[in-house]
């Protein structure tokens, strides 16, 4: 078993590394914060990443059967919640809850 001082040192190193990765972009790029490219990336990159995550989720699915039904229904739930309330947290929690309920309840197609 590791000594407590080693575990504290590792935790501190991880905390400093995490802090630096969060602060350095703001500290180094403060002069170009209003650059049009950063505005463009800030506007369009999050939706592009969400589409990539959806494509990654469905990349190995066999659409010939009904095995993808829970994923498809959870995607519909997320889309409906987001279009209705425009709350990313609600959309994520609602979609995850919907999917987990279907998996645990044994929805046909699993």
Image: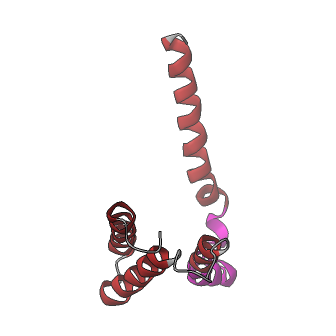
72 vs 42, left or right, is: left
Q: Establish if 91 lies above or below 16.
A: below
Task: Identify the residue at horizontal 47%, vertical 68% (top origin).
Answer: 110
Quadrant hosting residue 90: bottom left
- Out of 71 and 81, give the one closest to the viewer: 71
Q: Residue at x 54, y 44 (%)?
A: 19
- The chief SS type of the magenta part is helix
Position of 86 compared to 8: left or right? Answer: left
Return the x and y of residue 26 as percentages of the image width and height.
59, 59
Q: Position of residue 12 (x, y in %)?
A: 53, 28
Q: Give percent across and percent down for residue 38.
A: 65, 77
Query: What range of the chain is rendered magenta?
Result: 29-49
Q: Is residue 43 highlighted in magenta?
A: yes
Residue 70, magenta (yes or no): no
Q: What is the total number of numbered labels drawn onto the structure image?
A: 0
> 94 or 4: which is nearer to us?
94
Nearest to the observer: residue 15 or residue 47: 47
The color scheme shown is secondary structure
Report the side of 73 relative to 54 (left or right): left
| Residue occupying image coordinates x 66% and y 64% | 29
Which quarter of the rendering shows the N terminus? top right
Residue drawn at point x = 48 percent, y = 80 percent:
72
For the residue pair 62 and 35, the one nearer the viewer reads as: 62
């Amino acid at each position: 078993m590791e000594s407590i001082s080693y575990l504290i040192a590792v935790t501190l190193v991880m905390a400093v590394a995490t802090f630096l990765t969060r602060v350095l972009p703001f500290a180094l790029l403060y002069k170009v914060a209003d650059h049009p490219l950063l505005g463009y990336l800030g506007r369009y990159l999050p939706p592009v990443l969400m589409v990539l995550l959806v494509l990654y989720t469905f990349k190995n699915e066999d659409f010939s059967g009904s095995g993808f039904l829970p994923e498809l229904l959870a995607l519909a739930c997320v889309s409906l919640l987001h279009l209705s309330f425009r709350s990313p947290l609600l959309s994520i929690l609602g979609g995850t809850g919907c999917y987990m309920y279907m998996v645990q309840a044994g929805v046909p197609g699993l």
